[in-house]
Image (cartoon, grey):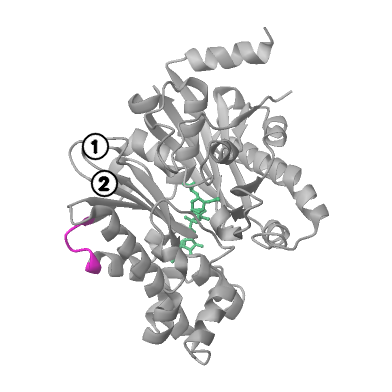
């Protein structure tokens, strides 16, 4: 047996594994690094989040990725160069982080890496029946493994697509394993660049669980702020949005996309929800002359309205607790709007479930890697739309 397989076997046989989950989302703010101790597997999985940090990307990283990010026409050489480079950069960031935490590499069993989504393209979006669902994440796992010396599990989304899914949201797997409760109906709401939710009924019936993208969380707001307020990455504390007035006409136009009328589960990304989307809505509603603060106020309300609608559709009148996560929880205007419109649902964050809300997606990938190593029978069945019962991730050895 190859020594690497032997080591992997021993890792799988341990009662606990130290797994570093890495998430680099659509906001391109930085790399989320979550050091988790994971015990058990499947519905017995338990995670202790030992350490967490987000290492911000430098401007050069952002601009290299942005040159191809969610664009249909790109320089193929740049895409090719980015794939190993992002893997190496992420590896260097893990090395930096472990040095900072004074944790030797030998203590880490596995890295679980999401990579950087460059383009997400479900068939409903490209609408060309010659092709199926597709999504592309860069940041190759071999480069991460060689740069860190740590076995790396990566590229989780391809198996999901191969088995009939759209490659997202993968949150449903981790959410069900970690957070499903017989005490209450739960909605796990993540407000990142794109917002998504997972419905976890207290029946804990896997056939009733689902996860779906909702639409924009922060992505259009971020893009607009970056365009109109050079130097800013986002509207900190929603200061700009809170100083503006919502345009009912623009809000109405923003809500017209057929994506919002589709049933769950569905996925999307900044390929759809971007500044062109906003420009078309402004044209359709003759609101091109709005002041930037009013546009931001309207975009903020747009995200809130779509999230509220998705939660109401999921709960169908039943009480539930909403556990929010992602950068959007730091937007006080958005959170106020959600709380005001959902008075019968308790709105809190995953901090109540001992998971730092900024770390939740990185933890999710640690759980998926753990399932790849030791998971047994999936609680979902292949018949469930959007939740194929498959093991995800590709294993890269360090040498
Ligand atoms: N203090 C704050 N005030 C307002 N908004 C904030 C604040 N902090 C973070 N955000 C928002 O959260 C975003 C980052 O969120 P997050 O890191 O969850 O996104 P992501 O993981 O990149 O996205 P996705 O989950 O779609 O891949 C920022 O770009 C910003 O819009
Ligand atoms: C293709 C892709 O990267 N999708 C992300 C994105 O960010 C939020 C939303 O869109 C979600 O569907 C997904 O990430 C999370 C982690 C998921 O798969 O659950």
Q: Looking at the image, do the residues carrying marks 2 and 1 touch, with CB atoms under 8 Å apart?
A: yes
Location of the C terminus by quadrant is top right
- Specify whether residue 345 is painted magenta: yes
Vertical placement of 103 versus 28: above or below? Answer: above
Is the residue marked by circle 1 packed among few (<14), some (14-19), or many (20+) residues within 10 Å? some
**Residue at numbered disc 1:** 181
In-front residue for pair 191/38: 191
Where does residue 100 sit, x and y in percent of width and height? 57, 39
In-front residue for pair 316/328: 316
Location of the N terminus by quadrant is top right
Vertical placement of 30 versus 202: above or below? Answer: below
Q: Secondary structure at mark 2?
A: strand
Residue 228 seen from this side:
yes
In-front residue for pair 55/289: 289
Residues rendered magenta in the picture: 340-346
Q: Quadrant of residue 231?
A: bottom right
Where does residue 307 sit, x and y in percent of width and height? 35, 63
């Amino acid at each position: 047996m190859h020594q690497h397989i032997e080591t992997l076997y021993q890792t799988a046989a341990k009662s606990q594994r130290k797994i570093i989950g890495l998430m680099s989302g659509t906001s391109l703010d930085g790399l989320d690094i979550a050091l988790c101790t994971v015990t058990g597997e499947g519905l017995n999985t338990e995670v202790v989040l030992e350490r967490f940090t987000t290492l911000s990307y430098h401007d050069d990283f952002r601009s290299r990725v942005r040159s191809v990010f969610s664009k249909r026409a790109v320089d193929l050489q740049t895409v090719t160069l980015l794939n190993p480079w992002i893997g190496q950069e992420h590896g260097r960031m893990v090395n930096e982080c472990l040095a900072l935490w004074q944790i030797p590499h030998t203590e880490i069993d596995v890295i679980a890496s999401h990579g950087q989504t460059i383009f997400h393209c479900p068939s409903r979006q490209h609408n060309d029946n010659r092709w199926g669902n597709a999504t592309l994440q860069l940041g190759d796992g071999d480069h991460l493994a060689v740069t860190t010396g740590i076995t790396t599990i990566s590229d989780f989304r391809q198996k999901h697509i191969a088995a009939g899914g759209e490659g997202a949201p993968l949150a449903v797997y981790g959410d069900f394993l970690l957070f499903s409760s017989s005490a209450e109906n739960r909605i796990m709401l993540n407000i990142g660049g794109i917002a998504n939710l997972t419905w976890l009924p207290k029946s804990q019936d896997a056939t009733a669980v689902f996860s779906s993208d909702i639409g924009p969380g922060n992505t259009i707001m971020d893009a607009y702020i970056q365009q109109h307020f050079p130097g800013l990455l986002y509207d900190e504390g929603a200061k700009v949005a809170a100083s503006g007035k919502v345009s009912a006409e623009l809000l109405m136009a923003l809500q017209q996309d057929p994506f919002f009328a589709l049933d769950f589960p569905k996925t999307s990304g900044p390929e759809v929800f971007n500044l062109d989307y906003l420009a078309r809505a402004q044209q359709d509603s003759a609101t091109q002359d709005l002041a930037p603060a009013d546009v931001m106020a309207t975009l903020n309300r747009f995200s809130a309205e779509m999230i509220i609608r998705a939660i109401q559709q999921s709960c169908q009148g039943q009480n539930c607790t909403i556990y929010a996560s992602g950068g959007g929880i730091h937007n006080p205007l958005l959170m106020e709007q959600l709380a005001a419109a959902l008075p019968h649902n308790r709105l809190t964050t995953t901090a109540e479930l001992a998971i730092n809300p900024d770390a939740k997606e990185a933890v999710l990938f640690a759980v998926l890697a753990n399932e790849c190593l030791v998971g047994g029978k999936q609680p979902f069945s292949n018949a469930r739309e959007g939740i194929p019962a498959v093991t995800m991730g590709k294993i890269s050895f360090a040498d």
